[in-house]
Amino acid sequence: MAKIDLYDPKWVDMVFADKNKAYGAYQLRKSVSQRNIKSLAILLVAAFLGGGYLAYQIKKHNDEIAAQEAYAAKMELAALEQAKKDQEERKKQQKKEEPKKIEPEKVVPETRATVKFTAPVIKDDKDVKEEMPPMVKMNKETKLSVPKQKKVLKTVVS
């Protein structure tokens, strides 16, 4: 099968050989390749301009983000330095304000007499003798004492 190129000027001349060439279709068919080249050039220029604009916007956005990050880093560094200065000032003030304190001797209160705890021993029921010591003897051994209370007199004012 023969390859037919509809855009070839020879083909266009053959189709319009005995026809009215002033009608307009002949000029359109004859200049189609020039129009295709122009449209392709316009499309490429528009694509380059659009791509360039997008690249510019992306770079601008990245620069803004980088500037914001740099500003945030500077602010954080300044805050840390300020905190360090404040901490040093507090340490200096604490050193000046706190002379060595002489602690008074602590008086140890008298210890109370206590009964030693004896651990329970487990024995068989046969060996256990149930003897309770008399209460008087137990009171003398433990020396129970009740703290004295002060008497408060209440006066009613009418």
Image: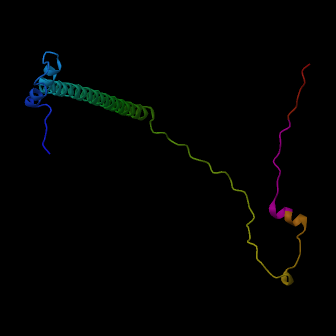
Q: Quadrant of residue 136?
A: bottom right
Question: The N terminus is located in which quarter?
Answer: top left
In depth, the one of 91 and 22 nearer the eye is: 22
Task: From the top left corner, tell me how far across and down residue 134 is, in percent.
Answer: 90, 68
State which quadrant residue 100 falls in. Answer: top left
Q: Residue furthest front?
A: 18
Q: What stretch is highlighted in magenta?
A: 139-151
Asked whether 55 falls inside the magenta stretch, the response is: no
| In the foreground, 30 or 156 | 30
Looking at the picture, how far across and down is residue 130, in whole percent?
Answer: 89, 76
Q: Judge whether 38 appears above or below 121 on screen.
A: above
**The C terminus: image quadrant:** top right
**The residue positioned farthest toward the top in the image shown:** 22
What residue do we see at 49% from left, 39% from top? 101
- Please name the residue shown 89% across and 26% down the image: 155
Q: Residue 143 in magenta?
A: yes
34 vs 118, nearest the viewer: 34
- Where residue 37 sits in the image (x, y, percent)? 13, 27
Tell me if residue 102 comes above or below residue 126 in the rendering. above
Q: Among all residues in the image, which is located at the extreme right? A: 158
